[in-house]
Image (cartoon, coloured by chain):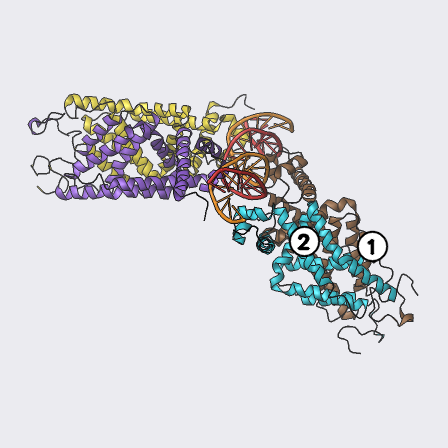
Chain colours: A purple, B yellow, C cyan, D brown, E orange, F red
DNA sequence: CATGAATGAGAGTTCATTCAT
DNA sequence: AATGAATGAACTCTCATTCAT
């Protein structure tokens, strides 16, 4: 019998390390953060840390796994909606809303660090792709449904729409990472307009048919 | 012996170094690239390199300056168009077209590296913002014009539309950096549809007014 | 609860640890073996191990003591023989025979590790000398007897003959440690020939006095 | 053109490092010696050292190569002799004579360290075998010649005689490493006696034929 | 008695930068 | 101007040993 140290304790320690690492990676960068700093931030000795993670890369991999788990849980909630376009907009709103939360800052700034890392590190790349696979097919499915219903432009490749929609989000995350002052809610409204076909009309006049702006009639 | 090295020679040497650095940063990452590697790639000694750049960061800064100069030249060309929406679409097409060029790969992969770097390095951050300032106001101007004409949704904050449109581009760059196989042209068509209000309609019914995608009638 | 753990239990545990350590030291080297590995091999916790031995060096010291005890038992058996040369040969045969046993491999490979260690570690050195003292005087005694009888070259320093004979054995052990394929029995025959004055004759002519090798008559 | 730093300078630096390493390895052991200590002993910075050797193992490998080169030069000198037995004895005398030189102490103590290392490290093992290949075939050749002439016992496997003769030397080296006081010259005389069939005679009497001891008649 | 989580000094190695030539 | 040898602080990771449970 091992003396205490439950499964839970073990998980807590790992979380403690990951949380510390998120903070440092996010604020100082992945490569600029030393293991010593993570230890200090986690209030733990080096030896202890290495008992739970065998390398810096390992910590990052575990972070991905943790967030993939959390996201896949969340995924199933946001889905059911009136129609494809509404689903898309609602999905976006959910996702952008989290960007507004100051508490999420470390998390999405970390993401940017890891995007760069994924370019160069096959293991991180693989995990990044796994995370993408969580969202990509869901959005692609919505698009296909929308195209069947005639609500979404049928000329567009449904496989690639997630790349554009996801890309839009990534781009906003990036800018929010640079500048906490970016008004994500307002950005989200622009995104929603784009998705709802409400951003522009090629020919302005026509008038009566649909009025631009918030006015309904 | 010539009394001084010509301005031109100096510029050529700097370019030679920057080109080498772009290749290494792009392929191996900014932090993973050593000065030795840059020297080897540039076929130059350490001493020579340090004569032209006083640090790794300095090379990156010079890269930004170089690309800012190039882009501001290009800027003035793409502008004049029939109307705001057409201008937007044309701008996008120009910009995405470059992503398709395999020769540009090192360049945009470098960009991703620097985005992460800008998050933690004030000097890089400043330069990144300068680059953004090149495009942001231009797009904002187009949006305002579009809103005046009633062609673009007047509810949207024109200051933030560049963030979304630029963000979309960044997101595609990121994904193209990860996977060279991404079909950027097809993505661009999706972007154009979004910008042209041609992506979706909230109400599906075929009113005949606007033709949607492949749908007949 | 029993008031105290039996002497026997204690000895068993120590043997269990030493056996595990022998295997690891032998296969991976003394310095390359970690306490963790010994624990794993001994199927025992770190805490338990440290209850029986207070350091890595301590384990090695105990190993020496154990083998010194075993050898001194064995010593008394091989001794009585017809004459000094026969005794020497018989002693060698006994000792080399053990090298042929694959089960002894870990043991003699460990020895090589410890020879190197004895060079720099005074405590190990002391133990190694103790082990030598087991054999040295015995062989020296045989030599002196042989010299008295006129069977062994009287010019040779009897104190040093054990060094040469023992050295020969060590050298074979070393080579067998490197290459399990070495034919120790054949080597032993060479050793016996050397000891019996049967290796060479300075003058080749077949004087008939002593038969050489395969030569008949 | 590189600025100074001839081939010779480069070789001197490498020697400087190897010499320092020999001293430390020999006196404190291979594993107990840190790179810092080698640097200090070589009066050189860590960075400088790593310019010449990319790892601790690399230093050892270079040492082997250096000594293999030196030995193979020496090899060709000692060879020609009156007959096989004389050649053997002369070879031994040459080799043991070097052990008596106090200046050689670091070198042969290092050897012992590496013997242990070779057991466990394939690269070192390979080099050790290479070194053995320098001597082994030479001695084997002498033995075969001796057997042809009837001067050496024809029953003995000539391939294995080098193992025994070399082993004898290794065993003496080992003991000299432990105790600088060992009288190597006297040991060498014992070795010579063994090789010359002058160590013992199975049957003591016979008398007149050959008298034991230094006396000629 | 036993456990194994925790410690932290220290190992080998790297690399941006300097500077004598 | 150019060279590349030299520097040494800093890095990631290891491991013998301790001790609360």
Q: Give left or right: position of D150 versus A54.
A: right
Q: Please name whichever residue, C120 or E11, is drawn nearer the observer in this view of the structure.
A: C120
Position in image of residue B217 (x %, y %): 8, 41
Question: What is the distance, in whole Å, between disc 2 and disc 1 at their CAs?
Answer: 31 Å
- Residue at which label 2 appears: C65
Q: Give left or right: position of C11 versus B80.
A: right
Label 2: which secondary element: helix
Question: Of the numbered discs in the image, which one, if any, rests on residue D30?
Answer: none
Q: Please name whichever residue, A168 or C139, is drawn nearer the observer in this view of the structure.
A: C139
Q: Is residue D15 above or below residue B161?
A: below
Position in image of residue E13 (x %, y %): 55, 40
Chain ID of residue with mark 2: C
Q: At x 41% / y 39%, what residue is drawn?
A: A14
* Quadrant the C terminus of chain C occupies: bottom right
Of all residues shown, which one is farthest toward the bottom? C217
Q: Is residue F20 above or below residue D200?
A: above
- Residue at which label 1 appears: D186
Chain ID of residue with mark 1: D
Of all residues shown, which one is farthest toward the right? D217
Around disc 2, counting alpha carbons within 10 Å, would you say few (fewer than 14), some (14 to 19), or many (20 or more)? some
Q: Quadrant of residue A212?
A: top left
Q: Please name whichever residue, C177 or A118, is drawn nearer the observer in this view of the structure.
A: C177
């Amino acid at each position: 019998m091992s003396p205490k140290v439950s499964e839970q304790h073990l998980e807590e320690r790992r979380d403690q390390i990951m949380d510390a690492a998120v903070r440092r990676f996010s604020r100082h960068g992945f490569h600029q953060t030393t293991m010593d700093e993570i230890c200090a931030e986690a209030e733990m000795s080096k030896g202890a840390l290495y008992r739970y993670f065998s390398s810096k890369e390992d910590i990052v991999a575990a972070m991905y796994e943790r967030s993939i788990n959390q996201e896949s849980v969340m995924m199933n909630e946001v889905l059911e909606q009136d129609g494809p376009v509404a689903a898309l907009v609602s999905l976006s709103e959910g996702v952008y809303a989290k960007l507004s939360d100051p508490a999420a800052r470390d998390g999405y700034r970390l993401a940017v660090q890891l995007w760069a890392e994924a370019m160069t590190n096959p293991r991180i790349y693989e995990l990044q792709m796994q995370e993408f696979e969580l969202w990509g097919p869901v959005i692609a499915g919505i698009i296909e449904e929308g195209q069947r219903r005639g609500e979404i432009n049928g000329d567009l490749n449904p496989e690639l729409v997630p790349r554009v929609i996801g890309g839009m989000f990534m781009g906003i995350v990036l800018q929010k990472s640079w500048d906490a002052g970016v008004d994500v809610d307002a950005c989200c409204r622009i995104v929603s307009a784009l998705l709802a076909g409400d951003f522009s009309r090629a020919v302005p006049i026509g008038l009566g048919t649909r009025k631009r702006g918030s006015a309904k009639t």
